[in-house]
Structures are given as structure tokens and as C-alpha cells.
Amino acid sequence: MSFRGKLWVMVLSGAIAIYAVVGGLPFMGYVLNVNAQQPVNDAGAQLRIVESVLQHIQNDYVDDPNMEKVRVGALRGLANGLDPYSSFLTADQVKEYQAGKAISKTSIGAEFSQVSGFLYVISVIKGGPAEKAGLKSGDVIEYIDAKASRDVSLYDAVQLVAGESGTTVALRVLRSGEKPQTIKVTRGTYTVPKAESRMEANKIGVVKVYSLEEGESADIKAQVASLQKQGAAKIILDLRGVAGGKLEEAANVANLFIKDGNLATVIGRENKPTKTFAADPAKAIFDGEAAILINLSTAGASEAIAAAFLDRKRGEVVGEKTFGMGTEQQLFTLKSGDGMLLTVGKWASPNGTPFLGEERATMGVKPSVEVKRPDTPEPLDVESLGDGPVQPNPGATPTPTPTPKPKVAPVLEDIQLKKALEILGGAASAAKAG
């Protein structure tokens, strides 16, 4: 088979994957049984399967297939079979990406990923448009305006959410324990809050981090230095709700507390490290006891800090298992003008364990001291979301009820912070936090 023929077969394999998912399982079962003796991950065996299906498309499909549509669908399927962060880009999207226009659109102040094919809200920025509109961490977005998020890649979904400042996007949201609802978010500029700090009893300082974008590590350093001047002997670094950001910034923050050794790693093909971040002893400014707070909305760069603390035994990591994110992509352009945005690296702990896994069990960073909040939804059974509470019997005779008073959300005890304070010996502060 010629190289060109093999290339065409590989392109069509994505379409076949989609066909198998949406209704071709009996046929694909037959083809796979014929090739059952071939190793699943053998490229040659897979090519022969695809070649067989290609012959059926060419010889048996009822109409003359539109090969342009088949090619685009196939390429989308190829990327979809890899991970949420790899994506097929059309020629126009490639031009936008290369010109930086794709990232210049106004977002709504939220970090997204994919769960069960749906757009998933990892975290929302404090004070941003998403939070103001009522979007929450853990929300599953079923529709973006009239477009089903399950029908598009993560890249396309994020581009649909973003847009011109002042315009509105309607998001149909599935939320645990509630009926499906549509939340309209007005896109606009916002400012990510700077790191904040405060002193608790027993000389314990707390640094609340909101972002690890470029330059944020310097602000966190200033907060740590400020706490030291106030007499802090122990520090809690609160990374809950911090998603995205730069790995370099995470390494810089970890370096404030860890003065030697490896702090983070980027893993490439064959699990080989392609980049490492080593600590600089001159940049370490705090050697007292320290602890980290994490939750499900801790993702990406912030996971690197937690992993560094665990691997280097620098202090306890308290809270819930993190989301599991952190990749590096490279755009490969094709002769057609289209492109493939492929994951070429995974962010990992100092010992080389990636944060992104193939399933929930192998994703994220596990805390050394687990403390689960009752209001944290697990991103597992998306299909059950939106069932909501049981509604009254519609045939029953209605009875007059007084006008309900506006509901006030209960203030939940911060049991994770309380535990961290206890670990650092701040019993009085722990009681205050509760």
C-alpha cells in the first residue's frame, strides 16, 4: 500500500471511530472479530481494519460520499480519540491561532475541561462575569447557545463561550441536585484578584492564591514576606479553586518553600522528561512549617506545587483530590491548511507522575490528609445531573402557602482550613475557623 494510501486510511480512521460510537458497533464488531488475533495497538493491524471499512464506503455506501466532509470528520475523530486538549483546527482556526486571535477573545472568567464529552467548569474567577452570572465550579454545560457541547471539541467549545466584550452567551447548565437551568453570561473584562494574606493565632499565616498566571509568583512571594514581617512562623498556602496558569510560576512558588532538588517535570513520549524545574537555594525564603490546601478545582499549575510538597515531604497537603490537568500542545499544519493541535507533553510531579490520566482514578494529586467538603460534586456521573428534587404531584389539589422568604445560602464550616490549622498546631485558630 502506498504512503499516500496509508495516510488516507489514517485520516479516515477517525470517521470510523465516530461511526462505531454512533451506530456502527455491530459492523465494527464483525471487522474486529476477523482481526481478533492482531494486537490492538499494532498500527499495521489497525490500518488493515480501516482499509477494509474504507472499501465498504467506496463500494457500498448509498451515495457518492463528500470526501471533504469525510476528511474533516475523520480528522476531528482522530483528535477526539486522544485527550480533551488535542484538537483538529480548520484552516481559518489555524490562521486565528497563529495570529493570536483565538486567545484574544474575551472570556467569561472560567477554566474549562471535558467530562464525559461535556464542557465542564473546573473553576470560576472571583468577581468575573461567570461568577456574577451564577456559574459554579462543577457545573456541566450541556448547550452553548444552541450548540450541544458534546458535539464539539473542548477547543471549539471554549471558543464558542468566548466572544466580543458586551455580548451574551446562554449556557444550559446541569448541576447536582437541581433542575437544568439556562444561565446567561455577559462577556466582559475582569481582573483576577491578587494573592491575599492574613495572620491567624499561634503565628500562623495564610496566603490565599487566586491565579498562577505570569507574574503571580512575585505577588505570592511578597505576601509570604509580609507574613514573616508580621511574625508568622508557619504558613498555609490555599490553592483551592486555582486552575490553569503557568508551570514556571508554580515552580517559582514551590521554590519559596523548597530550596533544593527538582520541583516539577514535563513528560514527553515514552514517559521521558523533556523539561525539569530545579530549585534555586537563593530563592527560598521560608523554611518554617507549611501546609497546602487543595480541592477538586485545583488544577494545572497549582497541582505542581502540591505535588512538589508531597514528593519532597515539605509539608502536609490537606483537602480533596485535585482535578488532573496540565499539558503542552504543538500545532502541526497540514497541506490542506488545516491543523492538528496535539498534546506533546504532560505536566508532572518531581518524580514524573503526570497530573492528567486516562481515567479519574489516575488523575490529579491526592492529598496526604483527605478532608472532603459535602458540597463538592465529583465529576463522574454526568448523566445523572439535572434530575433535581422530586416535584409535587401535579394532580394534587394545591393548598395556599405563605410567600417564601428569599433563601440564604448557609455558611459552611471551612473544615479543610480548620484541619490545616490543627496540623500546624493552631488549635485556637482552628476553633475560630470553625
Image (cartoon, rainbow, N blue to C red):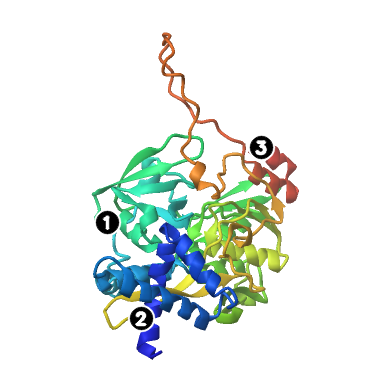
Q: Residues within 10 Å of mark 2 (few under 14, many from 20)?
A: some
Which of the two labelled residues, at mark 1 and mark 2, occupies the earlier sequence position? 2
Residue at (60% x, 64% y) in the render:
305
Q: What residue type is labelled 3?
A: Lys
The x, y position of residue 146, in whole percent, is 28, 48
Residue 182 visible? The answer is yes
Residue 329, disc: none
| Label 1 element class | loop
Residue beneath disc 3: 432
Residue 8, disc: 2
The foreground one among 248 and 336 is 336
Cα separation between marks 3 and 1: 44 Å
Q: How crowded is mark 3: few (under 14 residues within 10 Å), some or many (20 or more)?
A: few
Which of the two labelled residues, at mark 3 and mark 1, occupies the earlier sequence position? 1
| Label 3 element class | helix
Residue beneath disc 1: 163
Q: How crowded is mark 1: few (under 14 residues within 10 Å), some or many (20 or more)?
A: many
| Label 2 element class | helix
Cα separation between marks 1 and 2: 35 Å
The x, y position of residue 429, in whole percent, is 68, 42
